Image (cartoon, rainbow, N blue to C red):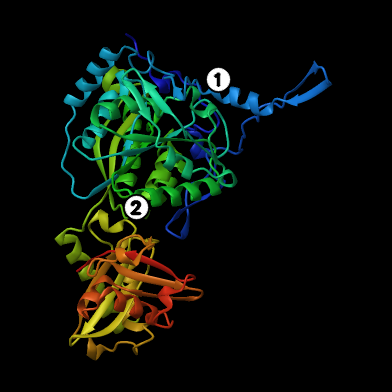
Amino acid sequence: MKIKNDERTKNVSANSSLVIASKTKQSLFTLRTGSVRQSRFCHLMGKKDCFVTPFLAMTTFSNASGIVKINLLAVLYCLFLFIIAGCTGNIKEPSVAGSFYPADQNELKVMVNMFLSRAESKPVEGRLIALISPHAGYQFSGQVAAFTYNHLNERQIDTVILIGSSHHVSFTGASVYTTGSLKTPLGNIKIDESIARSLLDEKADVRFYPEAFEKEHSIEVQLPFLQQTLKNFKIVPIIIGSPTREAVDHLTDKLMRVLSKNKKAIIVASTDLSHYHDYQTAVTMDNKMIDAIQRMSLENVEMHLLNGEGEMCGAYPVILTMAVARGLGATNGVLYKYANSGDVTGDKSRVVGYGALGLYKSSLSKKEKEELLSIAKKTIFYYVTHGKVLEAEPKDIRLKANGATFVTIIRSGDLRGCIGNLQPVMPLYRSVITNAVSAATRDPRFPPMTRGELGDMSVEISVLSPMELLLDTKNIVIGRHGLYIVKGENSGLLLPQVATDFKWDVNTFLEQASVKAGLPKDAWKDKNTKLYTFTAEVF
């Protein structure tokens, strides 16, 4: 059976931009990591298109009482949703079976299993937060996709957030499929309706717009691989149209909360890479994009897209996924496999690139910790001695990923300064440099350090996880959790090791956090007080 390549046959709509990204400079939205907004990617097109609202219909009929007018809006709208979604009893039929992948169950199963058997799975330390997988016809990108999904084998995943881009329909915001199941020749996959509905927000342009899924392949082609690698899982399909600031911010926050609460959930972003360049040009462009993703650098992803040095038809799904992953503490991306259509067909004149990647949150290595400690100490010495900030560039790429840190200075066993930042708004090494200077010279509890104090000094670094809203104080674990308390304009933070050092129980920890914020010790009980917990990697 001949399977077509989506990237060679699809009807590219306004919001599935390929090379257009490099021609548009208008900033449309910001992505938010935690509570801090950072400038991110620009709109790939110059306009926002909204879908057409179903028409209003009114009819009349006669009865014994006369002419009665009935508004059929509700009935026709439900019928509209039913028809265009291709649903039968809330089961959406496949749209591209028989074209992008085999429609025959046995043939499809054999093909997917063959791809999986040929794909290696490399052991990677840390929590796997997200995957990036291609979405062309299986004969072109199926083998690369298998490298993505082989890393789900033997993992206890119960929810998969699938994020694709609209290739056929132009609409504003994002569409979340909220009910029923999606069908493939291998069976039906249930929607996690609770999570899906929790993502909806009309004001943020996040709704269920079924036409977005009618002919869309970017999510559908991922499903058979999931069915062959996972058991007892549900999905949350999301299609990104022309995104708004509100939609992206809303989804970033909501998905961070979902993955924070459910460690068995994962995101899969669907995208192909460069399109229709000669083989060597494509490899060069794709390597730049892959490098930016591996370094978790949204800034470089944006830059490559804007200046034409890199391309992704699923730019928005990848950017949204990276923002969520970074907010959850992901520090590095791992490339499982790269290839392009020229490697499959032999035609290297005009190729499409495919990448399989995973985004991980992992602990720092001993070498990385030593480098950060060295940077902190050298920074303090240099600033106290010369009054200038040391310009240090780390050797390890991972230290250039964003991170939140606290730097603590200790002299003769006593605290000499401790300053940090709560959100990962700058590269990890830069956070250490900034906080090292502040801990030495700007902690309001101490005078600035002098040269005479440099000889008897030790430094401790705490790398913070994202903050999580605390709903029940019974969930606090002494030695594992730090506390951040906020009431009005007052706030205070205590690192996890503080409670251990002073041998506090949970109640004392809460009281001391309140006092640290300049509040009464029982302020943590106030309904207007917000409590957050976090963990920290301390070295």
In-front residue for pair 139/240: 240
Crowding at label 2, few (<14), some or many (≥20) Cα neighbours within 10 Å? Answer: some
Mark 1 crowd level (few <14, some 14–19, many ≥20, 10 Å Cα): some
Vertical relation: 432 (above or below) 412: above
Which amino acid is tagged 2?
A: Ser
In space, the residues marked 2 and 1 are separated at their CA atoms by 36 Å
Seen at 45% across and 40% down, the residue is: 196
Residue marked by disc 2? 260
Q: Residue at x 41, y 51 (%)?
A: 299
The residue lying toward the viewer, choosing from 105 and 22, is 105
Q: Is residue 267 left or right of residue 456?
A: right
Q: What amino acid is found at the position of numbered circle 1 in the picture?
A: Ile
Q: Secondary structure at mark 2?
A: helix
**Above or below — where is 354 with respect to 517?**
above
Question: What residue did someone put label 1 on?
Answer: 83
Does any portion of residue 352 appear in the rendered image? no
x and y percent of residue 120 in the render?
16, 32
Q: Horizontal and vertical percent for residue 110? A: 22, 16
> In the picture provided, is 50 more to the left or to the right than 516?
right
Q: Secondary structure at mark 1?
A: helix
Whether residue 31 is visible: yes
Foreground of the two, 98 or 78 = 78
Name the residue at 39% across, 14% down: 99
The quarter of the picture where residue 524 lies is bottom left
